[in-house]
Amino acid sequence: MSTPRPLVTPFTQHAKIDVPLICGAMYPCSNPELIAAVSEAGGLGIIQPISMSFVHGHELRAGIRKIRELTAKPVGFNAIVEKSSDVYTQRMKKWVDIALDEGVRFFITALGDPRWVVDKVHAAGGVVYHDVTERKFAEKALDGGVDGLICVNDRAGGHAGARSPEALLEELGGLGVPLVCAGGVGDEHAFARMLRLGYAGVQVGTRFIATTECRAHDDYKRAIVNAEASDIVLTDKISGVPVAVIATPYVKKVGTKANPVMRRLLQHPRAKHYARMYYSLKSVWQLKRASLQGMNYKDYFQAGKSVDGIERVEPAGDIVRRFAATAAGEAALAG
C-alpha cells in the first residue's frame, strides 16, 4: 500500500508527522516495536516509561535508542504528573530529561499540573498536550501552558471520560488550541469522521493492541477482536476510579465495584491517596500479568468501545496507512 498524501492539521504541524493519528501510551502494551511501527508509517507512537522499563525490560534511554534503530521519525512521550510521591515525581522528572536528551519533542501529560513539564519542553523547542475529560480540567491545563488537548471521551479504554466525542468537542471548542479525539475509534471510517467533526487528530489505543508488533498475549488480542462495545464495562477495582475493561469471566465473577470499606476510603480527603496507591500497586502486577501471560491468570484486559470496529490482528503500519488513505479519500469526495 503506497503512503498517502499528508493530512495537514495543527496537530500534525506540532508533532511534525504526516498522519494525525497517535498510538496512545498504554500500560502495559507500549513496547518499542509497536511505537516505532506507528511512527514509521507516519503516525505518532508514544513512549510510556513505566511500561518500557517494568514490563518490557528496557532502561528508558536504551529503549528510546532501540526505537531509533527502527525509525528516525518523531515519537512522543507520556508523563503522568500526578503527585503520588516525591520519589515518583523525581523519577518522572529524570525520565522527561532523558527523553528530551534523546530528541523527543512531543509530550502528553496527564493527572496533574503540567507546568513543570511545559517549562522543560518549551525550553527545548517542543510541545505539550494534556489529557482532559471536561472543560474545567482543560482550563487548568491551559493555565499550565500546554499547546493542545487530548480529549478523552466516554468510549475510551482505560480511564474513560463521561462525555461523547461530539459533546466534548462542543464543550472544548473555542479554547484556541488543537483538540485530539481519544476514544471510540477502531476503524478507518470512525477516524475520518472524527477529523470531519473538527478534531485535529485522533488518539487510538485498543486498535493498536490487536497488532502483530504489540507484545500483548494472543488471548488479549483475541478478546479484543471478539468483543463488542456492549462487552466493555467500567470497574473501580483496578485503580479506585472507573477503568474500561472487557467483561471477561473473571471480571464477571469478582464484580466491578470496590468493597464498601475501600469506597469510603476513596472518598475520604486524607485516606484516598493511600487507597489509590494500594490499587495502583495491585493493578501494576495484575495488568502486566494478564497482558503478557493470558487468560490463565486473573485478567483485566483494558479496552474501549472501539472494539466494535476491530476485526483482525494486523501490522500497525497497515492500520496507519489505511486510516490515512480513507480519511484523505473521504475528504476529497466531500470536496
Image: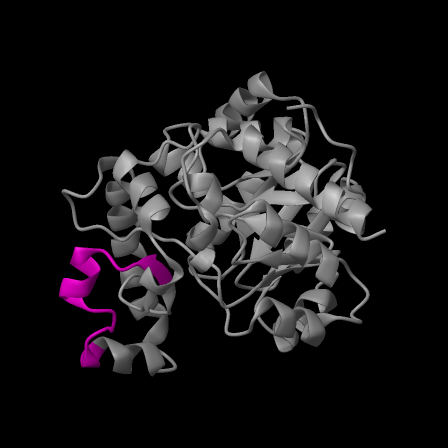
Residue 196 screen position, x and y as percent: 73, 57
Q: Is residue 12 magenta?
A: no
Can residue 123 be seen from the camera position used here?
A: no
65 vs 12, left or right, is left
Residue 99 screen position, x and y as percent: 60, 35
What residue span does the magenta drawing correspond to?
244-261
Residue 140 screen position, x and y as percent: 67, 71
Q: Nearer the viewer, residue 114 or 85?
A: 114
Q: Is residue 255 magenta?
A: yes
Q: Quadrant of residue 325?
A: top right
Can residue 53 be seen from the camera position used here?
A: yes
Identify whether 214 is placed above or below 168: above
Residue 310 screen position, x and y as percent: 44, 46
Please tell me how many numbered marks the rendered image carries. 0
Which residue appears at 27% of the width and 83% of the height? 264
Q: Nearer the viewer, residue 262 or 172?
A: 172
12 vs 272, left or right, is right
The quarter in which the N terminus is drawn is: top right
Residue found farthest to the right? 335
Residue found farthest to the front? 333
105 vs 277, left or right, is right
Identify whether 281 is placed above or below 171: above
Which residue appears at 65% of the width and 31% of the height? 101
Which residue appears at 65% of the width and 36% of the height? 43
